[in-house]
Image: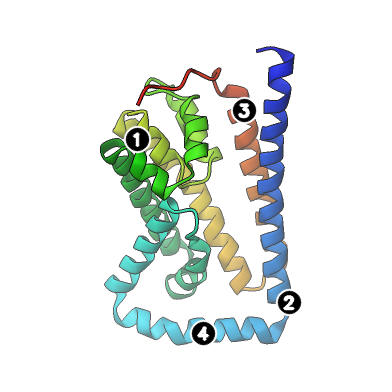
Amino acid sequence: MSKSTSTPIKTDWLLKAKRRAAVLLLLAAGLALVASFEQLHGWLIEILSRAEPIIRSKPVLGMSIFILFAAASAMLAFVSSALIIPVGVYVWGEATSILLLWIGWMLGGICSYIISRYLGRPVVKALSSGLALERYENRISHQAPFALVLLFQVALPSELPGYLLGLVRYPFWRYLGALALAELPYAVMDIYFGASFIERRMYRLAGLAIAMAAFSGWAIYWLHRSVPEKRSRPQS
């Protein structure tokens, strides 16, 4: 790759890493600010405490809704699992919430893969960013090494890799393995992030935000370093 080509791409990846890190740190700052106001934080905890007995009275339904919402957040950019994480942590604790969130994200990733592989590009474009998919689709194939696919899964927003790898017909079981490995650390960090907010543990909240930003930036950097040359667009 010539210098004139690599410099804009490098700048683009660097901007993506900085933007994601900035979003995570701003989110942590916002949560820390809310937690610092005892009355506001207490009001949010009161809502959770009132919801807890309702959810515990129908545990299977409550867990199913949590998993389905998590799955939707892994398929659609406008749905965020941040809305349900505090509920899960408060009602079931950290360990169970990690498992439920991980299962939900796995389910969402599997659905994304199946939709893109068997329903095709028009449906995928309606559910995700068509431009992003076209860009990354030209950089990966169904023969991509497992390590590269794992890196795609870690570095890209969670709603993209399943659609992308389904379109290029990447082997399902290898995709499932990459999905499971990539989503687990994010599930752990997100749940502990939510628990830190509930418990008003400001230092842990800040530390986790920095760790998540660093992990995400590391993944984007190495994806840039590892991604193959842009291939010609496949014929539809």
Mark pair 2, 3: CA separation: 38 Å
Mark pair 1, 4: CA separation: 40 Å
The earlier-in-sequence mark between 1 and 4 is 4
The numbered mark at residue 36 is: 2
Residue 128 appears left or right of 15: left
The earlier-in-sequence mark between 4 and 3 is 4
Q: Position of residue 135 (x, y in %)?
A: 52, 31
The earlier-in-sequence mark between 1 and 2 is 2
Task: Name the residue carrying label 4.
Answer: 47
Q: Residue at x 44, y 57 (%)?
A: 73
Residue 194, placed above or below residue 52: above
Task: Name the residue carrying label 3.
Answer: 224
Mark pair 1, 2: CA separation: 44 Å
Secondary structure of the residue carrying numbered label 1: helix
The earlier-in-sequence mark between 2 and 4 is 2
Of marks 4 and 3, the one in the foreground: 3
Residue 205 appears left or right of 156: right
Q: Are marks 1 and 2 in contact (CB under 8 Å)?
A: no
Residue 67, placed above or below residue 109: below
Task: Name the residue carrying label 1.
Answer: 166
Which residue occupies the extreme top position in the image?
2
The image's colouring method is rainbow
